Image (tube, rainbow, N blue to C red):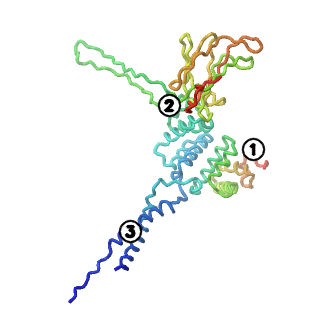
Amino acid sequence: MRPRRRRRFPWLALILGSMIGVGGGLYYAWYLNPVNLVNIAPAQLNADDRELYILLISEAYLQDGNLARAQSRLSTLGLRDPAEAVSVLADSAFLSGEDTEQIRALTTLAEALGGAPLAAEVYSGTVAPVEPLVTATITPTFEAMPSPTSPGDLTPTVTPISATPTPTALVPAASDLELLGRNVICDDDYPAGRIEVYVNTEFERGIPAVEVLVVSDDGQQDTFFTGLQPEISPGYADFEMEPDQVYSVTLVDLTEPVFGIDSAPCITGSGQSSIPTYQLYFGPVEATPEDESGGEGE
Amino acid sequence: MFRRTFLALLIGLGLGALGGAVTGWLVPTQEVSANLSKLNPDYKAEYTVMVGAAYAVNGDWDLAQARLGRLAEPDPAGYVVLLAERYIASGRSPDDIRHLVRLASRYGYVTSPMAPYLPPGEGADR
């Protein structure tokens, strides 16, 4: 009797087919016919539209002042920390020189939510809770009252310290900016005796909140920030010079000092004596190899 | 034997493709997101009201139109008019209605239910 051959199931073919099928199915689902969302909530918006949605919430808040409604609207975005999210957006708009109304709206809402946007000082009139580029010095004081009866009872009293939180960098990293141009104006029709600072991005947009340090040759120092006159430019700031001084101007942590800002009198076209006004233009460092001019013009 | 092997391969392919597709849809490769045109109608309405509120602040009609355009409604004016009338009919917030009516008016459409919500001096200009 001939033994009957066992017919085995071709498992190998089934597994191989499954593997190929799974690969094809995944390719189809991920690339050929991916998930297409409809009827979504704001939380499922892409990043750009989500930012626009937050901006609109802040502009609507600026219009109606209804914080509860703004919070309710923000809640539909599923943000973990709405105050932080709005602050970040306000900072981003502030630093990139966006429209001032948009910065104002975002800043106002961020503050109302308890956030601490960098633009608060400029756009809301309230005191900014963070002071950029200033290091808080923490000096705990100990008051020990020695007692002759119980010398081991010295209990130092530590005064409470409020440390200023360190903000993230406001502007491009150090040495990213340089003096691109300098104008000296001695004209009857132009305000005299000013140092006018313009700090711009490579796309000619003003950079606000840049700290400017002015030092005169008699050792007087003054600091001020760009962005306080957004109607001129978000990157604009100015300083009134004293007569007969020579000043240096530095964008703190960003540029080397610009020396030789001399407030000695000049003669205008009509023969009058006046103090010149200096316009200083700062911008990103040109990284081109043929950058032989050093970027300083007249 | 060959037929059985071929059949098994086909069955494997079919099952694998089905499982792979279902898995792919349930576990997308990247974060699934969509644009404003895919918003639920209620959120679209809320968005439109906010555009109207922003327009009331900045008066920038080009910007308002661009923002409404993001909803990809085939007839933005008609959409705003219908929304305004729906809000009026359902007794929604007068401020919201005013924002919508202002937009509709700017598009050049003012229906009689909208008239009481028009800001003074508007409505007859288009």
Three-letter code for the amino acid on which mark 2 is drawn: Ala
Is B115 on the left-hand or right-hand side of A64? right
Three-letter code for the amino acid on which mark 1 is drawn: Pro
- Badge 1 density bin: few <14, some 14–19, many ≥20, Cα 10 Å: few
Q: Is residue A138 above or below residue A123?
A: above
Is B65 on the left-hand or right-hand side of A109? right
Chain of the residue where label 2 is placed in the rendered structure: A
Q: Is residue A201 above or below residue A39?
A: above
Circles 1 and 2 on the same subunit: no
Q: Is residue A278 above or below residue B5?
A: above
State the quadrant of the N terminus of chain A: bottom left
Q: Is residue A38 above or below residue B124?
A: below
- Circle nearer the viewer, 1 or 2: 2
- Mark 1 and mark 3 in contact (Cβ < 8 Å)? no
**Where does residue A136 sit, x and y in percent of width and height?**
44, 24
Residue A173 image label: 2
Q: For the residues marked 1 and 2, what is the alpha-carbon distance in whole angstroms? A: 51 Å
Chain of the residue where label 3 is placed in the rendered structure: A
**Where does residue A279 sit, x and y in percent of width and height?**
64, 22
Residue B36 image label: none
Q: Which residue is mark 1?
A: B120
- Determine which quarter of the picture holds residue B3: bottom left
Circles 3 and 1 on the same subunit: no
Numbered-mark total: 3
State the quadrant of the C terminus of chain A: top right
Q: For the residues marked 2 and 3, what is the alpha-carbon distance in whole angstroms? A: 54 Å
Residue found 44% across the figure and 65% down from its top: A24
The answer to whether residue A177 of the structure is visible from this angle is: yes
| Nearer to the camera, B21 or A100 | B21
Residue found 63% across the figure and 17% down from its top: A240
Q: Which residue is mark 3?
A: A18
